[in-house]
Amino acid sequence: AIPSVLTAVRRVGREIVPTSFMMLVNNALHLLEGLLRQNKLIFGYAEGDAEPSRIPPADFARKLEGLAMHAMVWSLGGTADEGTRPKIEEALRAAMPADLSTPFPE
């Protein structure tokens, strides 16, 4: 999903802040890591990490999908100008699998 969306970022519009593909992916991963920590879904390798959440696997998958979508939307669309953001959203929607347990937000 990410390669087609990265191409769309460059093809469909402009960025307010110039980036590279590597920067966009790196930002998405850093944001996802922060969201996972905030939601106590990872732990154990940094001082002060909390105990992990105890949630059922199906709920974990749904939560992980939602957090990953959040990270992609903000890292890929956050550098785009306002006219480009709807086009990136369209590319993200097209790239998402139909069987996600968490629907893409409206």
Image (spheres, grey):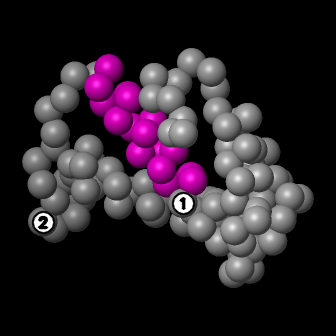
Q: Main secondary structure of the magenta part?
A: helix
- Give the percent coordinates (x, y) of residue 36: 32, 50
Kind of element beneath mark 1: helix
Question: Label 1 vs label 2: CA separation?
Answer: 26 Å
Q: Which residue extends farthest right?
A: 11
Q: State the quadrant of the C terminus.
A: top right
Magenta span contains residue 53: no
Tell me the quarter of the picture where residue 10 sits: bottom right
N-term mark: 1 or 2? 2
Mark 1 and mark 2 residues within 8 Å of each other at the beta carbon: no
Extent of the magenta region = 58-73
- Give the percent coordinates (x, y) of residue 78: 59, 67
Residue 97, above or below 37: above
- Give the percent coordinates (x, y) of residue 17: 69, 81
Badge number at residue 50? none
- Give the percent coordinates (x, y) of residue 5: 74, 49
Q: Is residue 54 visible?
A: yes
Q: Which residue extends farthest bottom?
A: 17
Badge number at residue 48? 2
Residue 80 located left or right of residue 72: right
Q: Amino acid at mark 1?
A: Trp
Q: Amino acid at mark 2?
A: Gly
Which residue is disc 1 drawn over? Answer: 74
Tell me the quarter of the picture where residue 16 sits: bottom right
Residue 19 located left or right of residue 10: left
Residue at horizontal 22%, vertical 22%? Answer: 56
Residue 17, above or below 103: below
Magenta span contains residue 70: yes
Task: Pick the residue in front: 52 or 102.
Answer: 102
Residue at horizontal 26%, vertical 44%? Answer: 41
